[in-house]
Image: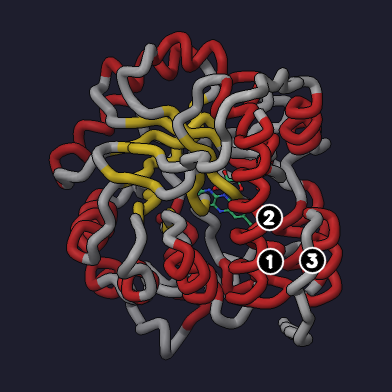
Amino acid sequence: MVLLEKTVDVSRVVQFEEWEKLAKENIDHNAFTYIQSGAGREETLRSNEEDFRKIKLIPRYLKDVSNVCLKTNILGETLPYPFMIAPVGMQGIAHRDGELATARAANALKVPFIASTVTTYSLEEIAAELPDTIKWFQLYWSGDWEITASFLHRAEKAGYSAIVVTVDTPLLGWREKDLTNGYSPLKVGKGAGNYFSDPVFLQRLKRSPQEDSTAAAEEMIKLVLEPKLTWDDIRFIREYTSLPIIIKGILHPEDAKQALNYGVDGIVVSNHGGRQLDGAISSIEALPAIVEEIQNKIPVLLDSGIRSGADAVKALTLGADAVCLGRPFVYGLAAAGQEGVSQVLQNFIQDLKVTKSLT
Ligand code: FNR
């Protein structure tokens, strides 16, 4: 794969569509398509954005907005802004520095970062770039319990302060465009950072990844997703970590209730950016019934379709404690590495401030 990585001046890039266009121009076609596309007919991908347009803000005026506070508290930690970087795997397809570039940009602005299981760089390398901000680790909970336990142990040791368990991916969504392109970043080892550095995984291999990276990537692919998992398996994660557990991918209020029954510490309302079940409800449409079920007992985050400060304020107004950004920062990364991510984040913070003040 050829990464063109032209240097682009992004200091005046503001609009989501412009970032998307720059990303498309700057990286490999199949990699861009992998990032941009959704599952199936992309109905959910579209509703994620469209459903935000159906909700309108009604502002109240003549209140002092000279010093609007954006801070929020989640699980005993103070977030400077009510948003986080969503876990996005395989960022090495967008830029050579992958998650390291994103982490450096997030750290400088103190934006909390969620590291995926399937990162190009290892969770330890990523954590080292995040000394000044909150970091959580997203777990794809493998059927191989020893590897899962090893990841949990490593995440805790590296200083991650919560485990985000993604539950909407018992298997990969039907991603028509990637199937057409015959493209998977996992096959070329772009999401192998945590596996190829894991002592338990390395023991399982017949030959080291240095000797045979294709065979190692194939072994890894067998382990990433596990369709047999059920709610009862949450107990295993509890046994192996003392960190708070957040379930990502909740769309049904009954699952929100289950999350409470199983004593989890938080949830993320998400449809994985329309990449898993096509035809699924948009996150913003799903939010009110879930907030109603949770009754402020645990934090509720939301992602999928957040493109602007107004989108975030709508989600917060409807009861989310914070939101997560996905594609917007990935496009920044593809367009201009760390500088691109930084610009996307700074714009988002300013937009949030303006929107909150005007509301
Ligand atoms: C993702 N997402 C994701 N989620 C997760 O739990 N683990 C992962 O490894 C990934 N990987 C990933 C790769 C790419 C390229 C994308 C675009 C997304 C989903 C992500 O965390 C988040 O739910 C969505 O990106 C939110 O939707 P928007 O903001 O992209 O619309």
Q: Nearer the viewer, residue 249 or 341?
A: 341
C-alpha span from label 3 to label 1: 9 Å
Q: Which residue is mark 3?
A: 13
Mark 3 or mark 1: which comes first in sequence?
Answer: 3
Where is residue 121 drawn, in percent x and y? 44, 74
Q: Which residue is mark 2?
A: 328
Where is residue 306 drawn, in percent x and y? 66, 41
Where is residue 62 drawn, in percent x and y? 64, 24
Q: Are discs 1 and 2 less than 8 Å apart at CB?
A: yes
Give amino acid for label 2. Answer: Pro
Give amino acid for label 1. Answer: Gly
Where is residue 182 drawn, in percent x and y? 75, 62
Compared across the picture, whether 79 is left or right of 331 comes to left
SS for callout 3? loop
SS for callout 2? helix
What is the number of callouts on the image? 3
Q: Nearer the viewer, residue 61 or 36?
A: 61
Query: Does any atom of ligand 1 lie closer than 8 Å to the CB of label 2?
Result: yes
Q: Which mark is residue 269?
A: none
Q: Residue sitting at 55 percent across and 66 percent down?
A: 90
Q: Image height check: is 312 above or below 231?
A: below
Q: Residue sitting at 78 percent across and 81 percent down?
A: 8
C-alpha span from label 3 to label 2: 12 Å
Q: Residue sitting at 67 percent across and 48 percent down?
A: 351
SS for callout 1? helix
Q: Residue sitting at 24 percent across and 39 percent down?
A: 76
Kindly tell me whether residue 332 is visible in this rendering: yes
Q: Which residue is mark 1?
A: 332
